[in-house]
Image: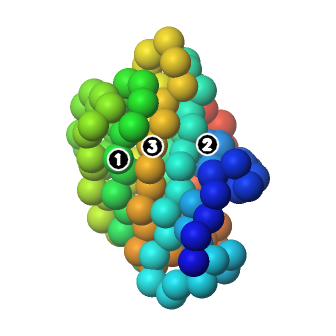
């Protein structure tokens, strides 16, 4: 199965990031994982959340940001990858002047039902 980026519509996930599902079982076949591109506009961040079942890998492709991963906070830039194990509280902020772009690999595939928001809105 092949997908073309320009044919994939973007949508906003529960955590507030804009997502393009590059490969997802519900849309493209496959059974065990999904690959998406997330965009976080400059100066904003996603909502603090966790996934009980899903393991994620974030790979930053553009911009810079600040990752909250459990009790840790650290800077990320293009080329960095972050492993997010199931149950780990996390969010990411775009700290630069351009949008933060991240490839997100999820196993099992991303599901809204597996996303538990831990805040109702972003706090300053």
Residue 116: quarter of image: bottom right
- Applied colour scheme: rainbow
The residue that label 2 is drawn on is 17
Measuring 52% from the left and 84% from the top, which residue is drawn there?
Answer: 30
Vertical relation: 40 (above or below) 38: above
| Among numbered discs 2 and 3, the one appearing first in the sequence | 2
The residue that label 3 is drawn on is 102
Q: Secondary structure at mark 3?
A: strand
Mark 1 Cα shell of 10 Å, populated few (<14), some (14-19), many (≥20): many
Vertical relation: 52 (above or below) 65: below
Residue at mark 1 to residue at mark 3: CA–CA distance: 5 Å
The residue that label 1 is drawn on is 59
- The percent coordinates of residue 43 (x first, y second) are 55, 18
Q: Secondary structure at mark 1?
A: strand
Front of the two marks 2 and 3: 3
| Among numbered discs 1 and 2, the one appearing first in the sequence | 2
């Amino acid at each position: 199965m092949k997908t073309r980026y320009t044919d994939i519509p973007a949508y906003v996930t529960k955590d507030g990031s804009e997502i393009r599902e590059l490969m997802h079982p519900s849309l493209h076949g496959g059974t065990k994982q999904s690959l998406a591109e997330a965009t976080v506009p400059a100066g904003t961040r996603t909502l603090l959340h966790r996934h009980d079942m899903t393991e994620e890998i974030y790979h930053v492709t553009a911009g810079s940001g600040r990752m909250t991963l459990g009790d840790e906070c650290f800077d990320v830039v293009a080329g960095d990858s972050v492993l997010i194990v199931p149950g780990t509280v996390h969010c990411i902020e775009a700290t630069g002047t351009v949008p933060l772009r991240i490839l997100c690999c999820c196993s099992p595939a991303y599901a809204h039902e597996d996303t538990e928001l831990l805040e109702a809105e972003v706090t300053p």
